[in-house]
Each structure stands twice: as C-alpha cells, then as structure tokens.
Image (tube, rainbow, N blue to C red):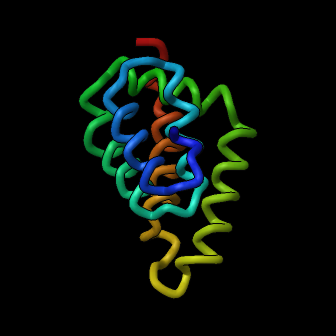
C-alpha cells in the first residue's frame, strides 16, 4: 500500500512499516522520500531523526542500505529536489523540505564509520 495512488493510503502504510524491524522495509521507506506527499516526508524525517537512532540494529541496516545503493539514493535525491522545485520551492527553502532533510540525514548516517556491522 506504500505505492498506492492515494497519498493518505501511503501515509497509513508507512505508519505500519516504520516500527518494523524487517530489513525489507528499508527501500520502501526511502523511496517515499522521492515523492510529493509532504506529510509522508515529515513522518520519515521524524522517524530518521528521532525514532531510528533509538534502534541500533535498524540504524545500522539503514546505513548499510544507503551505502550499498548509491544509484537508488541518487535517483531518490533527484526526485526529492524535483518535487520540491515543482511543488514547494515558493513555500519552503530546500533545507526546510522534509523529504530532502530525510535523504540528507540518511546520507550522513551512511557516512558514519561507527555504523558498520553492529
């Protein structure tokens, strides 16, 4: 349901997968950063900055995923910037757009050498 045409359905699906410790959920969460539903962006940003740091195993898994998938991250970042330009640049600076902030936080997370294999 995270791929549903209705953004509200996507947001509800996201609320069900964010608490999961299943590694397969990671690309579904990150992919949603490259979409236009700003409420989803706020949910992911909150997750990445507040909830994820409290879950060391998943924190490490997210870092490993980001490091292992540079093309996926690049495309996601490009989509994030594109939606910001199309829909939000007159309302928010890029450094205020939650999807962009979440992608940047994930990129910084992946750069942390302490987050190797836990």
Residue located farthest toward the bottom when viewing the structure as drawn:
90
Residue 111 appears at what percent x and percent y? 53, 36
Determine whether, in the image, residue 96 is placed left or right of residue 77: left
Determine whether, in the image, residue 74 is placed left or right of residue 20: right
Q: Quadrant of the C terminus?
A: top left
Residue located farthest toward the top when viewing the structure as drawn:
118
Q: In the rendered image of this protein, does residue 3 appear above or below residue 7?
A: above
Residue 27 appears at what percent x and percent y? 58, 32
Determine whether, in the image, residue 47 is placed left or right of residue 106: left
- What residue is at 53 percent from the left and 21 percent from the top? 24
Q: In the rendered image of this protein, does residue 30 appear above or below residue 24?
A: below
Q: Nearer the viewer, residue 28 or 46?
A: 28
Residue 50, located in which quarter of the rendered image?
A: top left
Determine whether, in the image, residue 37 is placed left or right of residue 56: right
Q: In the rendered image of this protein, does residue 93 appear above or below residue 21?
A: below
Residue 115 appears at what percent x and percent y? 44, 24
Count of number-bearing discs = 0
- What residue is at 42 percent from the left and 55 percent from the top? 8
Residue 9 appears at what percent x and percent y? 45, 49
Q: In the rendered image of this protein, does residue 71 appear above or below residue 34?
A: above
Q: Nearer the viewer, residue 7 or 98?
A: 7
- What residue is at 45 percent from the left and 79 percent from the top? 92
- What residue is at 49 percent from the left and 19 percent from the top? 23
């Amino acid at each position: 349901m995270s791929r549903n045409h209705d953004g509200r359905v996507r947001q509800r699906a996201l609320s069900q997968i964010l608490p999961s410790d299943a590694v397969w959920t990671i690309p579904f969460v990150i992919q949603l950063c490259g979409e236009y539903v700003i409420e989803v962006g706020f949910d992911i940003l909150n997750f990445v900055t507040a909830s994820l740091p409290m879950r060391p195993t998943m924190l490490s898994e997210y870092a490993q995923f980001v490091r292992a998938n540079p093309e996926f991250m690049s495309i996601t970042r490009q989509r994030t910037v594109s939606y910001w330009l199309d829909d939000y640049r007159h309302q928010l600076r890029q450094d205020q757009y939650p999807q962009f902030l979440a992608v940047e936080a994930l990129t910084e997370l992946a750069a942390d050498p302490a987050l190797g294999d836990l």
